[in-house]
Image (spheres, helix red, strand yellow):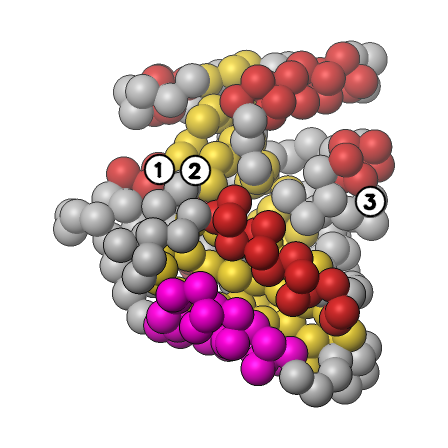
Amino acid sequence: MSRYVLTATCASTRGIVAAISGFLAETGCNITDAAQFDDPQTGNFFIRVSFHSETGADIQALSRDFAGVAGPFGMDFAFHDEAEKMKVVIMVSRFGHCLNDLLYRWRIGALPIEIVAVISNHMDYQRVVVNHDIPFYNIKVTPENKPQAEAAIMQVVEETEADLIVLARYMQILSDEMCQKMSGRIINIHHSFLPSFKGANPYKQAFERGVKLIGATAHYVTADLDEGPIIEQDIVRVTHAQSPQDYVSLGREVEAQVFARAIHAHSHHRVFLNGNKTVVFPASPGGYASERMG
């Protein structure tokens, strides 16, 4: 039985949910999970509906027929097939904790993605990537060749037909042009000490100030460095008894967890841009199930 997700957003008004549920019922679809949010600040309405078709309706037919329902509401919408995995390009530099975590989650089916390439400006993780039968691209970046390097990166993205780029501690700043071209399709991860502790050794700076919380932030990349719409955050507590090295280790753990949760949400079509913020709906029942254990 075909399982789909409908995502839609429009200006808030009455009758939206009734129109959507009525359409799905009339086309032989059964709703299995739904989440909605009406934002009084922006006046926007967001909805995500999981359903299965009992009549074998395909996405093309559903999209075509639903256009008549969406039109009067000025609705932006999309239908997604849950069986189709999102194509992802991972970019990494020399910190491998997020990359390795994603490879493991991908291998056991905990992330519904297809990793189509890994790009790095270093060679540190070539063997790890190749051993997973994933194409590895070493694209070196210098101040002199940055435009050419980004062109090479975009060539990989386009040739692999990637839906999403994830920056798994990729330590290069992307150009405004690339950020705009891939708007809403690049996710970054970093520690949450910004803007307090900038530059090198942020964990050492945090240790010296005696912070009690270490956090991580995953967000969409925009031209404003590290200030894009936030998808996921989390923290871990630290005490006076822990060393700077402890801070780094704990920071790596929370970064990997937050990054994976953000990618999971995006790949399940649970994230909606809402101005400078996001609306992130909870996962549907079974959304965290892995294809295999271990």
Query: In the picture, residue 32 is in which quadrant?
Result: bottom left
Q: Is residue 283 above or below residue 249?
A: below
Closest to the observer: 236 or 267?
267
Give the alpha-carbon distance from disc 1 to disc 3, as whole Å: 28 Å
135 on left or right of 270: left
Q: Amino acid at mark 2?
A: Leu
Give the alpha-carbon distance from disc 2 to disc 1, as whole Å: 6 Å
On residue 223, the disc is 3
Q: Residue at the spot x=51%, y=54% of the render?
A: 62
Q: Is residue 178 above or below residue 239?
A: above
Q: Secondary structure at mark 2?
A: helix
Q: How many numbered marks have been drawn onto this rendered protein structure?
A: 3
- Tag 2–tag 1 contact (CB < 8 Å): yes
2 on left or right of 155: left
Q: Which residue is identified by label 2?
A: 99
Q: Which residue is identified by label 1?
A: 103
| Disc 1 residue crowd, few under 14, some 14–19, many 20+, Cα 10 Å | some
Q: Residue at the spot x=46%, y=18% of the render?
A: 136
Q: Residue at the spot x=84%, y=36% of the render?
A: 176
Q: Secondary structure at mark 1?
A: helix
| Disc 2 residue crowd, few under 14, some 14–19, many 20+, Cα 10 Å | many
Q: Earlier in the sequence, mark 2 or mark 3?
A: 2
- The answer to whether residue 281 is magenta is no
Residue 270 appears in view = yes
